[in-house]
Amino acid sequence: MQRQVFRPAPHIENVRYAIRNIAVEAARVEAEGKRVLYCNIGDPLRFDFATPPHLVEAVERAMRDGKNGYAPSAGLLAARTAVANDAVKRGMSQVTPGDVFITAGVSEAIDLVLTATLEPGDEVLLPCPGYPLYDAIAARLHAKAVAYHPDEANGWQPDARELESRITSKTRALVICNPNNPTGATYSSQTLAALLDVARRHQLLVLADEIYDRLLYGGTHVPMGTLAEGVALVMLNGLSKAYLCPGWRVGWLAFVNPNLTRDLARAVQRLADARLCGPAPVQHAVEPALFGSQAHIAAAMAKLLPRRDLMVKRLNAIRGVSVVAPSGAFYAMPRLELPGLQSDEQFVLKLLREEQVLFVHGEGFGQKPGTHHFRVVFLPPLEVLDEAFARFERFVARWAP
């Protein structure tokens, strides 16, 4: 028998990413000749949205002008300056271009910061439900992901007291996603101030993930950096969502109180140097994105608002299903309370196979023990969503475990 020579490291078994993994089964269903209605992935360009022309023109011009070589490890100065100026405009006057790193999407920004921060055995506080990449990176670093549970009955707002009860002597960092993926919740200034006060008193690094900050259904977004006096805080953002170019992989991180994070910034610089740079030509879109026309955002929200409202109306009308209306982003996290339901992963797989509608199971994002959810992406056009919810309603009506 041939001996297996190369085996993966055991800790890779703990690295999971449900959003992509569930799509493998959808591909099998489509291979059978069935049409799947995709409500699982947050890519606006898979639907009826388009990258703003002035951003495409900026990148095309850069490419045609021969700006196709490596960028500095921290990113092009013009892009870093634009991010810093935008931060100052929004009330974070201490941010300078030297505090900014341009990355290959926000995913790389998260990876750089956590890799520079966490040692094996350290703990990081993550919202649950929350974006699964954080758990995956913690697993790779042999760190422990510790869940805190936003209150579904209170619009998915985190409770600072509940969060503080999770802190131990090994806790190093706190992740706050506002607006949140997968719930679509946005946090009040009072909630954010309470969370940041916990971080301040326990000297935690805060990762402020604000990638959906411009995608709001009314109300205003409060940048965490404006409330973070005395807090070591890293702001995370990028072009993927509000600027409709996820495949360009343009993200950034900014140290908002750099006097508290100078050693960490040097560590991030070392990691950034080791990977050379983020994609270079597309960095020329950062300045026109942040300081050019924003008309496409209003147009996108005009499409998304009726889609959100349809989702809320249709799902809340189904017995055994309830959903908190999201106030930002394009996700929601409906709750399932159906007889005999043991696994929401098995639920969404059965739905996919029987009705060809693809959601992502709540277990893939984490959830409060004893509860069951799924994430719905309401980016598809109204007629697609209407059909998806009709199929879903039919499925729930005949539900049997």
Image (tube, grey):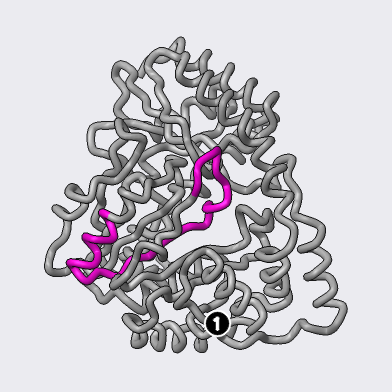
The span shown in magenta is 194-220
Q: Is residue 290 above or below residue 311?
A: below
Q: Nearer the viewer, residue 302 or 108?
A: 302
Left or right: 220 as drawn, with respect to 387: left
Measured as percent of width and height from the top left, residue 401 is found at 35, 19
Q: Quadrant of residue 250?
A: bottom right
Of 113 and 99, nearer the camera is 99
Left or right position of 194 against 333: left
Q: The N terminus lies in which quarter of the figure?
A: bottom left
**261 left or right of 370?**
right
Residue at 56 percent across and 26 percent down: it is 309
Looking at the rendered structure, the kind of residue marked 1 is Pro
Where disc 1 sits, the SS reads helix
Which residue bears the numbered disc 1?
Answer: 97
The residue lying at 68 percent from left, 44 percent from top is 298
- For residue 3, say whether it is visible: no
Which residue shows up at 57% across the image and 31% down it?
308
Q: Is residue 35 above or below residue 240?
A: above
The residue positioned 40% from the left and 20% from the top of the image is: 321
Q: Nearer the viewer, residue 70 or 400?
A: 70
Determine if residue 72 is in view.
yes
Residue 198 shown in magenta: yes
Within the image, what quadrant is residue 164 found in? bottom left
The location of residue 235, given as percent across then percent down, is 45, 67
